[in-house]
Image (cartoon, rainbow, N blue to C red):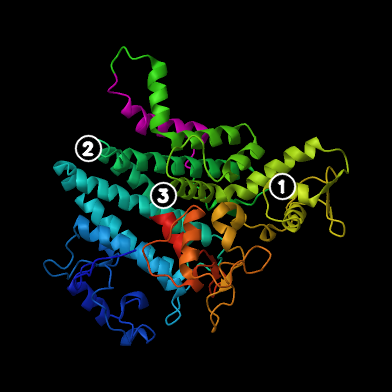
Amino acid sequence: MSLPLLDDFYMCSEWEAKDRQKHMELSRLECTRETSSSHVRSRKVDPRRVVKKYRRSAAGGGATVPDGGNTPRSVAQLDVTVHYLLGQVLTTAPFDADCRHSLAQVAAFVDDRLRAVQVDLTVQTPTMEASNNSKHLILVQRMEARMARYGLLVTYLLSNLDNRSKYEHAFGQTALDVAIDACLQWSILACRTVVDDDENNPIHILDEILSYAALRHVAGIITSRETALPPSFSSGSSNKGGGYSSLLILYQTHCMSHTADQPKNTPPGLVAEETHETFPKFKFALQLAALADGGNYNGLLKQLSLPSSSQVKTKDQDDVMWKTRCRLCLAPALTAIRIGAVRQYNKSFGKLEKVPASNMARLLYLPTPLSAIDFCKSIGLPTTEDDGFIIMKAAPINIVDSATLSKQGDHAFVFGILSSQWLQPNSIHDTETPKSNPRESHDGTNSDDDADDDDWEAKDEKDGFALPDVEIESSQNVASTDEDGVWIPPQNVIWSLIQ
């Protein structure tokens, strides 16, 4: 991403920055490059990198603040702050060779600063509602949408990190819920404004966020109803109660209002058709919810695996990114979905029938036959690893060790066609430059040793997504693992999924 040359202390007041430096509260991500590796008492504030920190008033955060020291930032300042945190810090700090940070460390910093952004937005809500400034309302809606997309991605990537001292999963899920709810509320205000440009119509973002809210609720229902799974597997999804009927509240609150102004003699069928055309992404989420409610898990996996949706007429890149985020929403329930699919297949096959692991991998949308064998073993089905078969109707589904199950599913399924170039991660903490070439094919051979970086960028755009406006070295266009063993997608994919 490209940011304008910021003034000093644009994202944080000078008083707060110097106060936190005095009390040794500076993060390595907001001090000068020369002191970023120093002890906290030796760090010096960088006036263009420091970002306002979240402070609870009950903890005395504003007791001695001078006039203007804790003034809420303007909408323009907040927009730049969100852009900087998600497009600069998140996409560069985990890959910085000079000052390395784990994804959990970066996420903890970004989460705190975004929380401060939410506070400033809440303080300014009455003023913006009264002014009805369409430009500001649409800007805030886009900020909230980016924060929601960020939450979907980061909570997924860190879902298997058990060290709570490095990342608090409950807080991450709460922040994601807040961003989605806030985006929906701001969308109600933004959609009341008159927008002549259809491409920038706020109803498009409302449609997108509604689909995420619905799918996260579906994921919570699926995991809570799968009795074979331990309670911990429902921690990465959102289930606020009410079952699938709660989705009707979303529809009534955010979709019906856009048909309320129809003439009284308008046929109901025309109103429904217009609603479906206006909310194609939400309609797709409701179709997935119907498949889940009917127990059609194979159909659910099939619809999720498609790189694009025929119901949604958008740019190819936008469609691919949206479908990837849909899979991120349902990723916490992937294990439960596959267990449900196995139950169905277990009824269909004969007693002690041997099913090739390759067939089971295809049915469960797993990347390899070996992964299908491992999955079936973890849920209690006997297998024959020597010849690669899974024995059906030989034993009931019984999870002996829940630690063998991943809450993430697999990255190849979640990221779909985006993962075609970086299935094998490289450690970003190696002292040498990673030897793997992003132009390598799946068999490990180099398809074009002499191709330059421009050709690689052109190939990225052809595959369905463009590189972000950040300077990224070619060696960083591959997946990586950090010091905690957390898998991190390439920088361009991170930004493309959030912007």
Q: Image point 37% across, 14% down: which residue? A: 267
Q: Nearer the viewer, mark 3 or mark 2?
A: 2
The question of residue 354 being in magenta is answered with no
Name the residue carrying label 3: 177
Q: Disc 3 residue type? A: Asp
Q: Nearer the viewer, mark 3 or mark 1?
A: 1
Residue 499 falls left or right of residue 474: left
- For this rendering, which residue is in front, 474 or 41? 474
Q: Disc 2 residue type? A: Thr
Mark 3 or mark 1: which comes first in sequence? Answer: 3
Q: Image point 11% across, 67% down: which residue? A: 67
Q: Disc 1 residue type? A: Arg
Name the residue carrying label 2: 193
Residue 166 is at least partly visible in this image: no
Does 135 appear above or below 113? above
The question of residue 250 being in magenta is answered with yes
Name the residue carrying label 1: 362
Quarter of the image for residue 498 reads bottom left
Secondary element type, mark 3 = helix
Q: Is disc 2 surrounded by few (<14), some (14 to 19) or many (20+) residues within 10 Å?
A: some
Magenta stretch bounds? 239-262
Quadrant position of the N terminus in the picture: bottom left
Quarter of the image for residue 25 reads bottom left
